[in-house]
Image: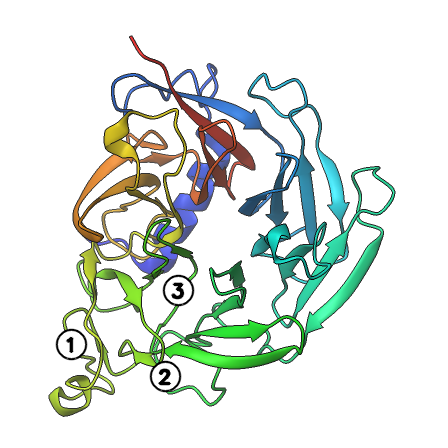
Amino acid sequence: MKTTGIGLLLVLLLTVGCSRSAEGPVAAAQQGLPPGFELSEFATGLGAARFMAFGPDGTLYVSSIRAGTVLALPDRDQDGRADEVITFAEGLTSPHGLAWRDPSTGDGADGWLYVGETHRVVRLRDTDGDGRADQQEEVAAGLPPGGQHFTRTIGFGPDGGLYVSVGSSCNVCEEEHPLRAAISRLNPATGQFELYARGLRNSVGFTWHPETGELWAVDNGRDWLGDDLPPEELNLIEKDGDYGWPYCYGDRIPEPDFGSPERCAATQPATFEMPAHTAPLGLGFYTGEMFPEEYRGDLFIAFHGSWNRSVPTGYKVVRVRFRDGRPVALEDFVDVWFKGGRVSHRPVDVATGPDGALYISDDSGGTIFRLTYKKK
């Protein structure tokens, strides 16, 4: 008998709260990693830890979405564990995406941390060096607030523009607000938005290829088409591109409620398909030097995990192998948090640290994990 979506969600929430082993998640987690890799806890007790960004001095910042805070996690002694948890900013409305502007732009933006709230973008700065933001400015208002997908992810592109992802307000519908189900480009100097690409139901995570400068984004497909449809997507995002939602998904497959072959013919098909309901969120190309050479330039994606599938799936970090600038294969990379039908953590974001380790955030256990590699 299949579990209903609501019933499965309750099961997952209950198992998240009671599935920690006496050894702790890390001691129990070493199986499910590639040879030579080790997983440790960088910081714990962070609440709903979501997206991350490393500051100019190497401090890791993470948004805690339910608490309305941004936390700073310094590792001054470089021992692989945060020295303390500092509340860098509080009183924010569902803060999610974080971005530091490249100081080489030379436009006075050095020292500002940009934050995507559900309804606007702000920037924060610590002027007295105590680790807490004492200056806040609104960069742009006018984002459609709330909705089924209320997080706002941001990132500075190679062109200096601040890109903003806004998910759909619904499971599947025709949107009225032009910035919904789209990625927009924001001019930080003017606060004006320009629609960059549309037809993206919920592209929570996006990043740029470190060599080509191309923009890549995941997209979460709709619910209630069964266990295996529609596929999650990894897309090469091009300016003015239409990626199909709500009219089609995957390789221009018409959506049963709105689509047609004629409408879908004019859209961009998925660049690379991934298993349905795995909920890909944060992603990043590996740019460090700690991992073996074969990992450099590959893409890592956090699969947050399903909530409405009869057999749960996801709850892991995957590796997408790239060849000649394009994705060619997907494989499990860190698969340690879903064992024996029990979920202990749900990964959200990944980031390469200045030390070359891969950092992974988790919004159910409130942990930042640190993945390292040691040569045998």
Camera-side residue of 357 and 315: 357
Q: Is residue 83 above or below residue 244?
A: above
Secondary structure category for the residue under label 1: loop
Kind of residue sitting beneath label 1: Arg
Q: CA distance from mark 1 to mark 3?
A: 17 Å
Q: Residues within 10 Å of mark 1 (few under 14, many from 20)?
A: many
The reply to whether residue 321 is visible in this rendering is yes
In the rendered image, residue 212, in percent from the top left (x then y), is placed at: 32, 55
Q: Quadrant of the C terminus?
A: top left
Circle 3 residue: 203
The x, y position of residue 35, in whole percent, is: 25, 18
Are dots 3 and 2 in contact, CB under 8 Å?
no
Residue 139 in the figure: left or right of residue 285? right
Q: What secondary structure is marked by label 2?
A: loop
**Residue at the disc numbered 2:** 173
- Per the rendering, the mark at residue 252 is 1
What is the secondary structure assignment of the residue under circle 3?
loop
